[in-house]
Image: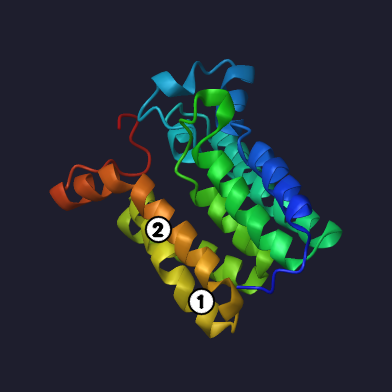
Amino acid sequence: MPDITSAPLLLGLVGLLSYLLGSIPFGLVITRVMGLGDLRQIGSGNIGATNVLRTGNKGAAAATLILDAAKGAIAVLLARWLVGQDAAQLAALCSFLGHLCPVWLRFKGGKGVATFIGTLLALAWPVGLATCATWVVAALITRISSLGALTAAALSTLWLLVFKEGQMIVLVGILTLLVYLRHWANLARIKNGTEPRIGQKKA
């Protein structure tokens, strides 16, 4: 972990603002604006890019993926620029929690993979790129988005060690654990062979 050098009140403000930024449900907003219906009534009901793809609109899914990653990255970059590295790591955690538990949706949010990678890209871009590449390769091989995400999250700690970013290991460990908890049902379906593959419209 980085040294805590910023004032507690300032860190609290960073945490709150990062949470609010992370809680913006871009998938839900985009599908509504584009007239694709209520995302929570489609497929798995999740607000992330994978479920947006089940509407059949690849552009909407790509926009959701980019914006969900961007909100985590922006929170980190602003916190680092305005406050410091301790605030940047806090911003990563809080923006991620905002995506998982958005106040606007009664704390029922997404699974956080895009936001997870966005925060890693902003904190240490080589780690973020390696994690993103792991996700893409694993998803292409298995044709299962959730398995790609879980593989990427599991290997993110390895990439921290490879790129000598050990000061992030506690944060990334927490984020990885939360990713796995949010994918608990997916893990069960993967084990049973019933997890939907990329391109399927039904969860």
Going 55% across and 40% down the picture, which residue do you hit?
99
Going 67% across and 53% down the picture, which residue do you hit?
91
- The coloring applied to the image is rainbow
Left or right: residue 83 versus residue 3 is right
**Residue count near mark 2 (Cα–Cα under 10 Å), binned few <14, some 14–19, many ≥20:** few
Going 50% across and 24% down the picture, which residue do you hit?
106
**Residue count near mark 1 (Cα–Cα under 10 Å), binned few <14, some 14–19, many ≥20:** some
Query: What residue would you read off at disc 1?
Result: 159
Q: Earlier in the sequence, mark 1 or mark 2?
A: 1
Query: What residue would you read off at disc 2?
Result: 177
Q: In the rendered image, is residue 137 in sight?
A: no
Provide the secondary structure element on which disc 1 rests: helix
Measured as percent of width and height from the top left, residue 195 is found at: 25, 43
Q: Quadrant of residue 147?
A: bottom left
Q: Quadrant of the N terminus?
A: bottom right
Left or right: residue 41 versus residue 203 is right
Q: How many marks?
A: 2
Going 50% across and 46% down the picture, which residue do you hit?
112
Residues at marks 1 and 2, CA–CA distance in whole angstroms: 16 Å
Q: Amino acid at mark 2?
A: Leu
Measured as percent of width and height from the top left, residue 187 is found at: 25, 50
**Between 10 and 26, the one nearer to me in the picture:** 10
Measured as percent of width and height from the top left, residue 10 is found at: 78, 52
Q: Amino acid at mark 1?
A: Trp
**Between 48 and 54, the one nearer to me in the picture:** 48
Left or right: residue 39 versus residue 142 is right
